[in-house]
Amino acid sequence: MAETDQALPPSDQLAAMNLTDTVEKHAFSDRVLIRSIVGRPDGGAGLAGERVRAGGWVKTGREQGKGTFAFLELNDGSCPANLQVIVDAGLAVLSKLVATGTCVVVDGILKVPPEGTRQKIELRVEKVVSVGEVDPAKYPIPKTKLTLEFLRDHLHLRARTNTIAAIARIRNALAFATHSFFQEHNFLYVHTPILTTSDCEGAGEMFQVTTLISESEKLEKELIKNPPPSEVDIEAARQVVSERGEAVKQLKAAKASKSEITASVAELNKAKENLSKLEERSKLKPGIPKKDGKIDYTQDFFARQAFLTVSGQLQVETYACAVSNVYTFGPTFRAEHSHTSRHLAEFWMVEPEIAFADLQDDMNCAEAYVKYMCNWLLDKCLDDMQFMAKSYDKGCIDRLRMVASIPFVRISYTEAVELLEEAVKGGKKFENEVKWGIDLASEHERYLTEVKFQKPVIVYNYPKGIKAFYMRLNDDLKTVAAMDVLVPKVGELIGGSQREERYEVIRERILEVGLPLEPYEWYLDLRRYGTVKHCGFGLGFERMILFATGIENIRDVIPFPRYPGRADL
Amino acid sequence: MAETDQALPPSDQLAAMNLTDTVEKHAFSDRVLIRSIVGRPDGGAGLAGERVRAGGWVKTGREQGKGTFAFLELNDGSCPANLQVIVDAGLAVLSKLVATGTCVVVDGILKVPPEGTRQKIELRVEKVVSVGEVDPAKYPIPKTKLTLEFLRDHLHLRARTNTIAAIARIRNALAFATHSFFQEHNFLYVHTPILTTSDCEGAGEMFQVTTLISESEKLEKELIKNPPPSEVDIEAARQVVSERGEAVKQLKAAKASKSEITASVAELNKAKENLSKLEERSKLKPGIPKKDGKIDYTQDFFARQAFLTVSGQLQVETYACAVSNVYTFGPTFRAEHSHTSRHLAEFWMVEPEIAFADLQDDMNCAEAYVKYMCNWLLDKCLDDMQFMAKSYDKGCIDRLRMVASIPFVRISYTEAVELLEEAVKGGKKFENEVKWGIDLASEHERYLTEVKFQKPVIVYNYPKGIKAFYMRLNDDLKTVAAMDVLVPKVGELIGGSQREERYEVIRERILEVGLPLEPYEWYLDLRRYGTVKHCGFGLGFERMILFATGIENIRDVIPFPRYPGRADL
């Protein structure tokens, strides 16, 4: 029976099955996305009879029926599921198709496989369009199960694994969820600068950006090719100037013709020019230019010292204080020598800034944003989340559901410290001492969100001594209007605050923490002229992915991780 | 009559007018967006009677009626239009409200203004909630009409001007349009690295990123505070070691007790440790660490030389060759000393990369993307576009309409050169000579798109000699499958190509252009293992904004422009 059905021409077959489904070709390619077949609720069954071109990389392949045909599990990265492809030996040399990593493009017809198979649909190949071969003996990532650590040494190929591809799709979804959330709420996306001459936190650990080294190396090479003039060369040039000067003098004394004198003066000027050029060149020294014993940054590209940004907050405030609701989403940098699983030298941050808003609004925005992302993943990435649950963290989907639905706990820092002290009294051991005034350590944060409340916790009103100068001083003069969002699995996910909008108060705070006023004059201007109540926060984008996926090491959730000693590609 | 109407309580008034409109409060603030009032198709008239809280900055203000009330034009950046606000003298000191740049938050009731005024609605203030004052004598950008050049010296305040705010909204719209377009077409957003150890074009002009300078400065300071040991110090320590050694020897010879010997050996070891510490410290030299006369980059943060990326293309190809359709959208950098109105040291680029696709697909994608952005602006930013048309470029809206609707002309490079040669024969003067093999100059590109065709033109199949090594060699062996999209007003907007996917061919091309193979081994791996036909392009995001708005200088369409000698904030 099945045989007979399959022998029908596709259009008849479709009519017979009363199907109107068709599969859409990709807009900018002549193939279809594998997701548009196997990602359907019916697993693709409704597409039986359709002729399609598919392309992808072989996950696993095997020759069967004594080499008369091959099964290929084909994946094109559009979803975690593969398309099962069957190729007859007459169409290609099967041994060249079956190696993991082989790229194949095939034309064929979609058919419902025989009863008892896992697949709802498979592709019977009619033509092998192209093959990108793999020598399995040399392929650096031959098997599907490799450690994440091993894959970090093969950044250029690791996106071909199920895990890294799933993370790429989840990362993409969270990025677009971020834009969608803020756009829906009328925030403007502002590109804050990567190159900066301001140090946001006043806390060092910045990468320097310069052209001084390459310029000095260029000069060094040039001076080797074309050495600077010696003292003798310069003396000789000086001699020429003095002779030419003498010649002019004599011509003038002899009342020579105007044209003779003009010619002679021209010669003199040429000699002078040559001398000054030589003198200029003799001053060229290899090495980085210095002035008064210090590096002369006036000769650097931006005529001053420049760094990679550690946060776009201060700059984006200039836009919040003009167009009200803004956010940044871009790379930020820390030159910290941390070798932990939670730090990167280059990472992405989302930083909204809201004018006419206070700390309550800030917490509301942070909570709504995190919930929105969780719902987005549950809605649009459930297949990838199921893969993560199966392979890495069986609780990850429940965690998303919980965070999406439960109101976040909100407690003051003082209450948080009391709860921690209670826990200590109850026998809980922390490595770091608990008392009012300390910066909460990761173990404290994890205790609050994972053990005490078992849900997200927002801690607010921190002691001013442990927070940045720009956070708004509360009326108690001891705490500032800061807030951190703590979530199970990663601890601190978000840090934010209401900003100090009072000119006199922030000026005092800058001096109090020992920073110079001059570099912050532009920031003070925002308070001098038309100041506005405003607040904002920063979310570490990679931390959100760790939270969502349950992956342990931050180096695995960014495509090209940068950390001390490593910046591959 | 109007008087009587206005005296009705708002709810009754609404009932009387049979209105069901209400104005939504901003989700994370207690005020409403001004756009949600004046941005409505009815200009806000339908909201008469609503009580709202509004906040914004005063564009212009004036006291009227002998100081009995003030008119304020209030703008919060949510749209180009202002909300007219009327404050009675009894509610505030009016002179403190009227200065341009003042921030005010007010509660009031929306009313239809008297006949004959431009506004459809105005806000009658009932309470002044807060004021951020401005001293007009000191405000750096007091008037509304300031040159764009002047504003570049006040980056932190310029978003408060109509022009820069409109550009910010247009830029935001184009950014979200970009994400929406690629997401709709199943592309994954991939964050390619900013810090890189690869040079994409092999063409230099990169910014170097280092911690060597700051580390050496730190060391220098440390050595001044705590000078390295002198030869005498070291000699003394050596002396101690030899004495302690002698003591151990004597104790052993004297067959002293085990505990005596152990104590003595411990003393010796301490002395040895001290000596080796001193010797280590004596080697510390101020300045950048060198080895064999060259800078020792093994001591730099990434243990090798690192740069800021000039393009994410090569890296994003690793994802295209795994998950098929990807794009980057991020900052890129060129350390060029160009002082033109078209170059920045830091600019944003959009770079899609499509697997299973060729040059035709690439052109289709580029054309669809540009059209999508034009339609998006016409759809969602018409008020801002009208402002740009009125103030800067009266043709800008027509240009968007034309590009959105007309198919792009597609001609080969060879045809383009023929057309330019014809033009020269017809009397057209170009500064740069026209002949097959030249890189088209901006004047040539502008002639084709602005004069010859007066619409967007895609030029494809360029001579291989003027294009990058990674572009696919055509069968004529003279040209490569490259394409540039030229548009009126800016010339080249997009550059792209099909990538060379054949291992032997690309290897040959790398050698042919004189590049070393070793740094490209990872890139060659993409061709060695499961190679795939693929293509992509780059769009200069700021150029798209120049094209859309008609603004002349690229420094005005990015929030924080970086160029030689300038990196403010």
Image (cartoon, coloured by chain):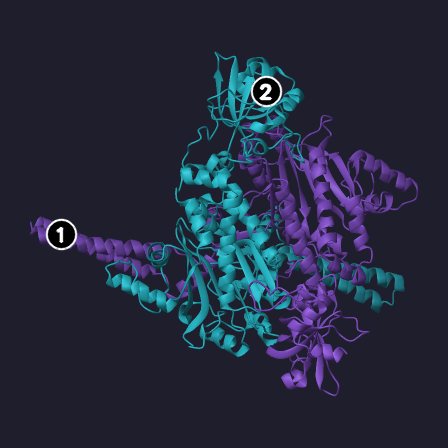
Chain colours: A cyan, B purple
Q: Judge whether A223 appears above or below B568 on screen.
A: above
Q: Residue at x 23, y 59 (%)?
A: A427
The image quarter in which residue B173 lies? bottom right
Q: Residues within 10 Å of mark 1 (few under 14, many from 20)?
A: few
The image shows residue B189 at horizontal and vertical percentages of 58, 44
The image shows residue B548 at horizontal and vertical percentages of 75, 53
Q: Secondary structure at mark 2?
A: strand
Relative depth, front residue between B516 and A284: B516
Q: Judge whether A298 appears above or below B465 on screen.
A: below
Q: Is residue B93 visible?
A: yes
Amino acid at circle 1:
Thr
Q: Secondary structure at mark 1?
A: helix
Q: Which mark is residue A125?
A: 2
The image quarter in which residue B219 lies? bottom left
Q: Residues within 10 Å of mark 2 (few under 14, many from 20)?
A: many
Chain letter of the residue carrying label 2: A
Left/right of residue A59 with respect to residue A37 in the rendered view? left
Q: Which mark is residue B232?
A: none
Amino acid at circle 2:
Val
Question: The N terminus of chain A appears in which quarter of the rendering?
Answer: top right
Of badges 2 and 1, the one in the foreground is 2
The image shows residue A53 at horizontal and vertical percentages of 63, 26
**What residue is disc 1 on?**
B262
Q: Is residue A564 visible?
A: no
Q: Farthest residue toward the bottom?
A: B66
Chain letter of the residue carrying label 1: B
Left/right of residue A262 with respect to residue A563 in the rendered view? right
Q: Residue at x 43, y 51 (%)?
A: A402
